[in-house]
Amino acid sequence: MYDKTIGTKQKGLRINLDRRIYGSFAEIGAGQETAAMFFKAGGASGTIAKTMSAYDMTFSDAIYGHEESGRYVVESRLIKMLSKEYSLMEKRLAEQRGETTTFFAFANTVVALNYQKTNESHGWIGLRFQLEPQAPYNDVIIHVRMLDNENVLQQQALGIIGVNLIYGCYYYYKSPETLLLSLMDDLSPERIEIDMIRFDGPDFPNVDNRLMSLYLVRNGFTNAALFGPDGKVLQPSEALYKRHIVLLRGRLRPVTNVHIDMLSNGLKQFLEEPEIDPGRVVTVAELTLHNLAANVDHGIDEKDFLDRVDILCSLGQTVMISSFLEYYRLVAYLSRLTRLKIGLILGIPNLEYIFEEQHYKNLPGGILESFATLFSRKVKLFVYPTLLPDDVIYKCQDFQLAPNLQPLYQYLIANDKIEDITDYNEENLHISTDRVLQMVKAGEEGWEAMVPEGVAKIIKDNCLFGYPCEVDFQPVVQQIQTVTPTPTP
């Protein structure tokens, strides 16, 4: 049973007194903070077979091998550390105590705050462990950002989250969501951010890491999580590092021909922009927590979330979940991940939302402060037209604003920050996502022609979005023809 009141020292002591648990610690870059917690708790000889830290790159390479990227705070380094240390545990101790012991290897590779306080503090942390003697191992891996402004506080936070990870893996493994929640015991999102988590191994057969990513965002452990077209979770700063990002946000319930037309033609115009390297472009479909909960009375419908993600992944899309309601906060986040140009694809209703001053009352500088971020030097909006009730096509040139905002809008147009998507399919303008959803739920005919090829089959075969049929509700990812050219990370 989860007890949030158990302190870090108590957790360390309980593990130290559990004679089944025995393993090694390898910590690179920010000291042996997790191992130190176990030593301070008392009785560490019952848990710790070895601790080590290799600060020098030459020593580190001699132990774990060379990284092709030349970077040391990366997931591939962590995996090498876990593999090396766990194999040594089995090789050296299996004969002596393998029948009674559950082995583990804890590792992290971290860059903490430098003396000048000018760097990005982050790290990879992982545990490879058995739950029964001589059983196959499991992995739980996380990526964190340390937010304390003092090096010593960052080290303390690393030690705490390391203890929480080991404790959670051994005592909360039956409930992965509880394990996830326990990682922040004695911590807060103001001190440390967890922006990626992955469970892997025979004792986690039913864990969907996409749901775990959703829980990270929903519980405020991070503002955004990312996974690729194959459904595997991605660490945002690595997946989007030195990438041009083209992003479409929406409910996407379901994806329609309008969304595909927006993304395809918006991407085409983005590629025509100066200084764009096509090989570095990644398209992202974003789902916000607000949109995920919009049609549910009690929080987020997890199955509905996975249904949408399954379809997006089948179309070759990288998917982001975020807590960003305002576009300027979204851009601030993306700009931290990449310095290359960003394109946002949106419709006229979203453009209207952006120019509503009421959304920026909490900012001292109001709408101007938000626009300083949203329309930064390397951000551009690509706007898809809307069809008015009288069949008039409504574009950027027709956009109506209050008199006090009109000069601001004209300034953005003149400086090439907002642009119409021009090569659109006029037939798609008659498609309403809400209407398509109503037809799907009612089992009406005709909606199939309004969604991309293959999507209708996925919806029908798996009874998605309330389609009237019976099925064993298990998330099913089906590969279908990719409708839009989608560079992936």
Image (cartoon, rainbow, N blue to C red):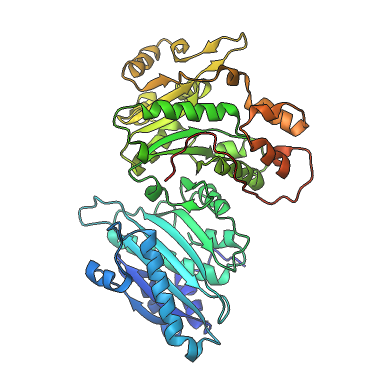
User: 192 or 458: nearer the eye?
Assistant: 458
Farthest residue to the left: give it: 116
Is residue 285 shown left or right of residue 109? right
User: 43 or 174: nearer the eye?
Assistant: 174
Q: Is residue 54 above or below residue 472?
A: below
**Looking at the picture, how far across and down is residue 187, in whole percent?**
44, 59
Farthest residue to the bottom: give it: 96
Q: Is residue 286 above or below residue 10?
A: above
Q: Is residue 395 above or below residue 69?
A: above
Say if residue 365 shows up in the picture. no
**Looking at the picture, how far across and down is residue 27, in whole percent?**
34, 69
User: 270 or 158: nearer the eye?
Assistant: 270
Farthest residue to the front: give it: 481
Quadrant of the rendered image containing residue 154:
bottom left
**Looking at the picture, how far across and down is residue 161, in whole percent?**
43, 64
Q: Residue at x 36, y 64 (%)?
A: 77
In this rendering, the count of numbered labels is: 0
Q: Is residue 337 above or below residue 62?
A: above
Image quarter hosting the N terminus: bottom right
Q: Residue at x 57, y 26 (%)?
A: 258
